[in-house]
Image: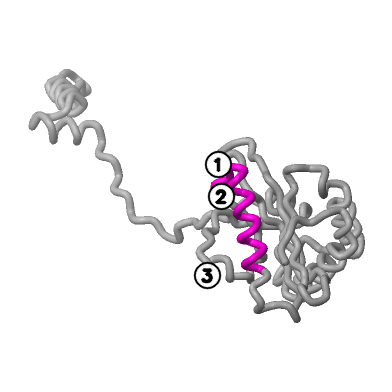
């Protein structure tokens, strides 16, 4: 049977959540965030404080018809982002079925019930986060839209302090020397440059002056 979780389910939800985190810890490619016993307590407080109290919390349980035992759960909430559309959306946090109860349709039944409630609330999209090695969601048609990266703060600080290396050319092509101003002038006008004309005039004047020698002029 599939139904909304109630406060009385908190102890069994705690058991399921502990099993979920233990199973995830064994498959994490990157052990981040790290989960421990204190997180089971935090989950217990979260469910105890919000079930049947907070209308934005959506938690569903699957029970074994023969024993009445909880064999799985789906938990999430209605979330709102500061910017971007859709502004309000369904955020799925946990979906877990006990190993010996898998293959019996409990997960599909939990999702079907949650989707019906989300439609009633006017939601158009559901978002979830998955570990990098879990590719089942892409296979099921979910579209990845963000990739989270993590780095210790000390490593971020060290990386920001380093100046990235810039490749320097090992050789440079020879650069032709810029033409002298007078050469450029001659090339453009076809006439000797002003400097050359002045030098020629000075040489002519120097050649026209008589040289003084002993006893008179040459």
Residue furthest bottom in the image:
100
In this picture, which residue range is highlighted in magenta?
A: 107-124
Tell me which label, 2 or 1, sits earlier in the chain.
Answer: 1
Q: Quarter holding the N terminus?
A: bottom right
- The mark closer to the camera, 2 or 3, is 2
Residue 67 visible in the snapshot:
yes
What residue is shown with label 1? 86
Q: Please provide percent x and percent y for residue 181.
A: 24, 32
Identify the secondary structure beneath mark 2. loop
Residue of label 3: 139
Magenta region, mostly helix, strand or loop? Answer: helix
Q: Residues within 10 Å of mark 1 (few under 14, many from 20)?
A: few
Q: Nearer the viewer, residue 213 or 19?
A: 19
Instruction: State the residue at coordinates (64%, 66%).
Output: 109
Nearer the observer, 143 or 33 = 143
Q: Is residue 125 above or below residue 141?
A: above
Name the image quarter holding residue 34: bottom right
- Closer to the camera, 10 or 182? 10
């Amino acid at each position: 049977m599939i139904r909304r979780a109630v406060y009385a389910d908190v102890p069994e939800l705690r058991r399921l959540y502990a099993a979920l985190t233990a199973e995830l810890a064994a498959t994490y490619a990157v052990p981040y965030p790290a989960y421990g016993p204190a997180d089971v307590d935090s989950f217990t407080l979260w469910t105890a404080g919000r079930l049947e109290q907070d209308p934005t919390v959506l938690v569903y349980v699957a029970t074994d018809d023969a024993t009445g035992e909880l064999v799985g759960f789906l938990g999430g909430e209605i979330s709102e982002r500061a910017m971007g559309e859709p502004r309000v959306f369904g955020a799925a946090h946990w979906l877990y079925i006990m190993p010996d109860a898998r293959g019996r349709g409990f997960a599909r039944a939990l999702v079907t019930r949650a989707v019906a409630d989300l439609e009633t609330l006017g939601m158009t999209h559901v978002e979830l986060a998955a570990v990098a090695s879990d590719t089942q969601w892409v296979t099921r048609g979910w579209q990845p839209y963000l990739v989270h990266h993590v780095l210790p703060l000390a490593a971020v600080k060290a990386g920001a302090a380093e100046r990235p290396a810039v490749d320097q050319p090992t050789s440079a092509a020879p650069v032709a020397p810029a033409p002298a101003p007078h050469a450029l002038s001659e090339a453009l006008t076809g006439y000797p440059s002003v400097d050359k004309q002045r030098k020629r005039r000075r040489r002519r004047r120097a050649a026209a002056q008589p040289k003084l020698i002993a006893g008179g002029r040459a």
